[in-house]
Amino acid sequence: MKKKRVVIALGGNALGKDYEEQKEAVAKTAKVIVDLVEQDMEIIITHGNGPQVGMIQTAMNNLITVHENYKETPLPTCVAMSQGFIGIDLQNAIKYELYCRNITKKVSTILSQVEVDSKDEAFKNPTKPIGNFLTKEEAQLNEQKGVQCIEDAGRGYRIVVASPMPKRIIELGTIKTLLNAGHIVITCGGGGIPVIDREGKLVGVNAVIDKDNVSSLLASQLDSDYLIILTAVEKVAINFGKENQEWLSDITVLEAKEYIKQEQFAKGSMLPKIEAAIKFAESGEERHTLITLLDKAALGIAGKTGTVIHN
Ligand SMILES: Nc1ncnc2c1ncn2[C@@H]1O[C@H](COP(=O)(O)OP(=O)(O)O)[C@@H](O)[C@H]1O
Ligand SMILES: NC(=O)OP(=O)(O)O
């Protein structure tokens, strides 16, 4: 029987916010991934990078204060660094979990670039929060230096950058080759390194692509059976956080679109996940997205929890 192919998008709580948290978080994440390997699934893993890419950019640019003539590190290079920073720990945690269970399987992290449109309207309206939460004063200092910040749901301020839509995964061929060779593939981390194609020359652009959007594109281009978005809630809700909150187990694309019209899903958190699920469902037959908690993934696949979005 053909193995089920599954793209798993890991959210912030599967990775932690800093190096110390990451080491612990990926060990837990690896157990969930290897549980799915044991169910004979072909696994492709993507992940976010919001806190990490902001931290890397700050660290790189602080070098200006200690090295004369040091030039700022471009944001797409920081995204590439975040793919390595997260990828290596995730890869090794999965390798160790496979070893503990006596499973022989290779794990590879692919540095991956994703083409975007230089005319994408998103470049005029930065929406992707990166880095740590800032105080109002820190945000004001950044704004004075031309770095845009937003107030994030009453939790503090964060730097925001452009988040254009992904158009083409440059390393798709390599990803397919490794999958067909039986590897677990970690790729499109942090949404992928955003590039534009200037007559064959790939040039990095200042942006961070949304990992849920790129995961949807990747899942459809790999003809995946499932897109699994692992996040901080067990199910998607309508009237989220209100007295009449209702958890959803199963919704059609039509219902999801109706809920979007009613503004049921918060921008920058649940909305991109639902939009990613809709695009994936519309890209072919029988393409289901499951949204749930990291440690409920197996139960979700068994249809016992989570929210499934389908045609
Ligand atoms: N309608 C909704 N149903 C469930 N969660 C929602 C909804 N709207 C907003 N959220 C929030 O979205 C969060 C997940 O988004 P986010 O934190 O950006 O995810 P991640 O980092 O895992 O990709 C949940 O923890 C929840 O607080
Ligand atoms: N690139 C990205 O979507 O990262 P987060 O999920 O951390 O926001």
Image (cartoon, helix red, strand yellow):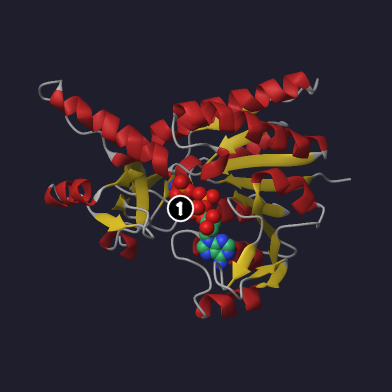
Q: In this view, does 61 lie to the left or right of 167?
A: left
Q: Quadrant of the N terminus?
A: top right
Is residue 105 at all visible to an observer of this figure? yes
Q: In this view, does 116 lie to the left or right of 110?
A: left
Position of 245 relative to 215 (above/below): below
Q: Farthest residue toward the front? A: 243
Q: Which residue is drawn at 27% across and 35% down?
A: 58
Q: Where is residue 82 in the image (x, y as percent from the top left)?
A: 42, 34
Q: Quadrant of the C terminus?
A: bottom right
Position of 104 relative to 257 (above/below): above
Is residue 275 at all visible to an observer of this figure? no
Q: Where is residue 34 in the image (x, y as percent from the top left)?
A: 73, 33
**Label 1 sits on residue:** 210
Position of 125 relative to 192 (above/below): below
Kindly tell me whether mark 1's CB lies below 8 Å from ligand 2: yes
Label 1 packing within 10 angstroms: few (<14), some (14-19), many (20+): many
Q: Which residue is drawn at 64% across and 35% down?
A: 29
Q: In this view, does 259 lie to the left or right of 206?
A: right
Q: Is residue 39 left or right of residue 11?
A: right
Q: Position of residue 12 (x, y in %)?
A: 51, 44
Q: What number of labels is visible? A: 1
Q: Which is nearer the eye, 167 or 261?
A: 261
Q: Position of residue 108 (x, y in %)?
A: 60, 28
Q: Which is nearer the eye, 102 or 296?
A: 296
- Tag 1 secondary structure: loop
Q: Which is nearer the eye, 30 or 46?
A: 30
| Amino acid found under the numbered disc labelled 1 | Asp
Q: In which quarter of the image is residue 118?
A: bottom left
Q: Residue at x 41, y 44 (%)?
A: 50
Q: Residue at x 63, y 68 (%)?
A: 282
